[in-house]
Structures are given as structure tokens and as C-alpha cells.
Image: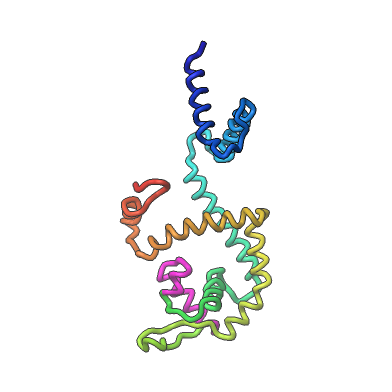
């Protein structure tokens, strides 16, 4: 006779007795069986089945897959965005994203607008200068600090946006593909968690040479601080 099995069964019975204080299950062998079955169902639901990805059998990490997929999705999005502005005076998707932010959030300084779009200062200034040249954005003195210039979208900029919004919305809908509403909500939750992690790092303007080492030292990666 396997005494280990007997011992484990007795422990399960003791656990069943302590958990079944509200008599959710009958105090007999059938109740004990139902309790074991329900615990197994709960356990299986808590285990996430890992998807299969290219290179997994050769040791490719989930972090590598996530990074690659995010890069690919960004490139797909740019392709659709280029199509949305193909017959307009917009040169890049960044130009209408800058205008959308100014329209949605109101006037802001150049650096505020550049940081909101997660870009380097030099690239952001070039975009802003093109928008000003087009007459879609104008600079004015800040009402709180006359030394500071703020940007605002002009009526011409709003019109340029509105002329393309149908195509922009179409591109946005295509980018989200065939995922369900529930999947969209879960994706927003996950991506926002990544946004909340990376944005403070970006705003620190850490030198590129020291960026990786600083992040590894100062920020929690996964479930631990490396």
C-alpha cells in the first residue's frame, strides 16, 4: 500500500473540511469529489496556455517576440497612414498626429508637443516648422510667460485635418484588424501599462550611451528589479 497517497488524501480531506465551513458541498464522498473537481477547474483556468511563436523551440524569448511584433505593427500602421494622406498636403503621419494633439489638448509649447509625440527635439522641430510654413500652426506669446512661445492649431489646420479624417479613421480601424472589442480593451490595458513604464524614462532624456544601464539599474523589469 502506498502510504504517501494515503497521507496526501488525508491532507486533502482536512483541507476540504476546513474550507467547507459554509457547507457549500455535502459532507460525504460525493461532496468531496465535487470539491476536488471545482478546485481543478479553477486551477486550470488560472494557467495561461502559452502561444506558439517562431523560434520558440530554439529558445527565442517572449521578450524578443513582443519587441519584434511591436516594430512590425508600427510599420504596418505607417503604411496605412501613408495611404490615408496620399492625396493631401501632409508629408508624414507625424504631421497630422501633431495637429490632432493640438486640436485635442489645446495650445502647448514646442517641447510639450514634441514630448507628447515621443520624438527627438530635432525631428520634432522640423515637423513643427513644416506645419507653421503650411499655415496649419501658429506661434503666439504665452499668456502666463511672455518669454515663452506656444503653438496652436489654426483654422486652416483644422480644415486640413477634417479633409482627411475619414481616411484617417479608416486607417485606424484597419490597424486594429480583426480583434474583438474585448481584446481591444485588454490590449489597451497592456499597452497603457507599457506606456506608463516607458514614458517617465523617455522624459528623463537619458544619454543614449547610458540608457540601457540606467534603466536596468533604476526600473523594475518584469517581476523584479534587475
Residue at x 52% of width, y 10% of height: 1
119 relative position to 36: left or right: left
* Residue 220 at x, y percent in the picture: 37, 51
Q: Which is more toward the observer, 14 or 214? A: 14
| Magenta region, main secondary structure | helix
* Residue 210 at x, y percent in the picture: 31, 56
* Residue 112 at x, y percent in the picture: 43, 74
User: Hey, which residue is sitting farthest top in the picture?
Assistant: 1
* Residue 19 at x, y percent in the picture: 52, 36
Protein image colouring: rainbow
Tell me which corner region of the image, top left, top right, bottom left or bottom right, holds residue 74. bottom right
As drawn, 68 above or below 56: below
As drawn, 37 above or below 135: above
Please state the extent of the stretch shown in magenta in the rendering.
Answer: 112-136
Residue at x 38% of width, y 87% of height: 144
Residue at x 47% of width, y 17% of height: 4
Can I make out residue 48 in this image?
no
Amino acid at each position: 500500500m502506498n502510504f504517501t497517497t494515503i497521507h496526501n488524501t488525508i491532507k486533502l480531506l482536512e483541507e476540504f473540511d476546513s474550507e467547507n465551513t459554509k457547507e457549500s458541498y455535502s459532507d460525504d464522498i460525493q461532496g468531496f469529489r465535487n470539491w476536488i473537481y471545482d478546485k481543478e477547474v479553477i486551477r486550470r483556468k488560472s494557467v495561461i496556455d502559452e502561444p506558439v511563436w517562431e523560434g520558440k523551440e530554439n529558445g527565442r524569448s517572449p521578450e524578443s517576440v513582443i519587441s519584434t511584433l511591436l516594430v512590425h505593427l508600427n510599420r504596418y500602421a505607417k503604411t496605412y497612414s501613408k495611404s490615408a494622406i496620399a492625396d493631401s498636403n501632409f508629408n508624414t503621419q507625424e504631421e497630422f498626429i501633431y495637429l490632432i494633439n493640438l486640436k485635442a489638448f489645446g495650445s502647448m509649447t514646442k517641447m510639450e508637443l514634441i514630448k507628447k509625440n515621443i520624438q527627438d527635439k530635432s525631428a520634432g522641430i522640423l515637423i513643427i516648422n513644416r506645419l507653421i510654413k503650411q499655415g496649419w500652426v501658429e506661434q503666439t506669446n504665452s499668456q502666463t510667460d511672455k518669454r515663452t512661445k506656444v503653438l496652436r492649431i489654426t483654422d486652416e489646420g483644422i480644415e486640413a485635418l477634417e479633409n482627411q479624417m475619414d481616411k484617417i479613421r479608416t486607417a485606424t480601424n484597419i490597424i486594429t484588424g480583426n480583434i474583438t472589442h474585448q481584446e481591444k480593451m485588454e490590449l489597451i490595458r497592456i499597452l497603457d501599462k507599457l506606456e506608463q513604464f516607458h514614458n517617465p524614462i523617455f522624459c528623463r532624456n537619458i544619454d543614449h550611451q547610458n540608457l540601457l544601464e540606467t534603466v536596468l539599474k533604476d526600473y523594475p523589469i518584469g517581476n523584479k528589479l534587475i
